[in-house]
Amino acid sequence: MPERPSSLLWVFFLAYFTFGMVTNCLGVVIPEVIKQYQLSLFAAGILAFAFYVAYGLFSLPTGLGMERFGARPLILLGVLLMALGCLVVSWARNYPLTLAMIFAVGVGVTVLQTAGNPLIQSLDRPENYHRNLTLTIGFCGIGAFIGPFVLAFIRGTGRDWQVLYLFFAALCVILLLLLAVSAFPARTVGTSERIRLDQVGKLLSNPIVLFYSLGIFCYVGAEVGTASWIVKFFERVHHLSAEVSNVGAASLLHRVLPTLPALVVALFWGLQGTGRLVSGPLLNKLGSRRMLRVYSFLTVAFLLLATFGSRRMSVLGFAACGFFTSLLFTLIFSGAINSFSQNQGTISGLLCTACVGGALEPPLVGWVGDHFGMRAAMLVPALSFTYVFGLAVFGRAKYD
């Protein structure tokens, strides 16, 4: 292990900042895509499907590829796919091509995250791993928060929304160059960390693996299904503009700042990142299982407040919902992993694959919104978060 942090750790901070921005900007991009291509909510939800289905298809293959080729070539490939996908989105003029390139970006992000997460442990002293992982996730949250502001600036200065993806492509090229000249540590994958396909069927018959994988599926689906439709919710329910910026404002400052719905999307992701950074002391005091129960219950409560409350209550509800989602993914994931002393690599791969829930729920929310309205549509992620609360109450994963 290095005596001081590797310079590659700082590159990974930039990498997670970038993929946080690219991943979580869909909530403000979808309304722009709807307007440009005259889409239904269901059709626009396929954009999120194209991105998140990559997790279901490429998490396990990436884990297997790491064992054979190591992290470096996979990470470079992932960032290259992100750069090329964003570049083509920036000039695409039809929806099918945009979908295909968003899928390519999703594959790149999946490969980067799946190969990068274990590598962070090798970039500093072991006792600093939790701190570095927290900082990495924090940079991801900062990127997610800033994304809507970048798009608001682009639209407010009279440019097309696709310029955002040109900006993303430039960030990815810088990241690719930094990674290409960085020294990667040699890392041996332990037996427990290896992915064994011959164990998948047996593990899925285990109730903890099955129900906690479903928990990841429901959580990611609900998270993306909520954030992707906040802007359209405010448009359909509270009759606010779906524009990301005040394009008709007289002053430049007002034109380049995000509208209230876009700001709420930024707050959802920004407060989620904040929650991950500030919830540590409470986690230590109450314990993982109790925190999962409290935060999952409050997530459901605030989402319902946002769904059925006034405009002001919707702002408060969606923002608070983002904050209380902050620990859910990591607590579900760690509970499942900590319950087993063997096959942890395979279980981790299955849990990452379950992130495909983020692909399926946004189109479903859009379909319900098309037919029954956006208040009814938000009940879909509320039900998924309710499953997570049920898992927190009745689940048998090992935490202590």
Image: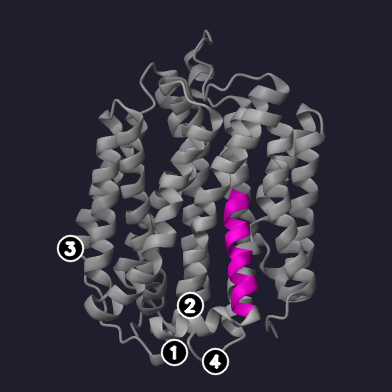
Q: Which stretch appears magenta? A: 208-223
Query: Could you tell me residue 391's position as x and y percent?
Result: 73, 69
Q: Is residue 54 above or below residue 103?
A: below
For the C terminus, the image quarter is bottom right
Name which residue lies at 49% across and 80% down. Answer: 201
Amino acid type at image mark 2 = Asn
Gap between marks 4 and 2, in whole Å? 23 Å
Would you name the residue on which mark 2 appears?
A: 128
For the N terminus, the image quarter is bottom left
Would you name the residue on which mark 1 appears?
A: 192
Dot 1, how many residues are within 10 Å of its Cα: few (below 14), some (14-19), or many (20+)?
some
Would you name the residue on which mark 4 appears?
A: 341
Which label lies toward us, 3 or 4? 4
Name which residue lies at 68% across and 82% down. Answer: 399
Amino acid type at image mark 3 = Val
Query: Could you tell me residue 281's position as x and y percent?
Result: 71, 69
Q: Work out whether residue 188 can be spotted.
A: yes
Would you name the residue on which mark 3 appears?
A: 181
Gap between marks 3 and 4, in whole Å? 37 Å
Query: Could you tell me residue 58's position as x and y percent?
Result: 36, 63
Element marked by disc 2: helix
Amino acid type at image mark 4 = Ser
Q: Are marks 1 and 4 in contact (CB under 8 Å)?
A: yes
Q: Is residue 76 above or below residue 33?
A: below
Q: Work out whether residue 195 can be spotted.
A: no
Query: Quick one: label 3 or label 1, which is nearer the N terminus?
Result: 3
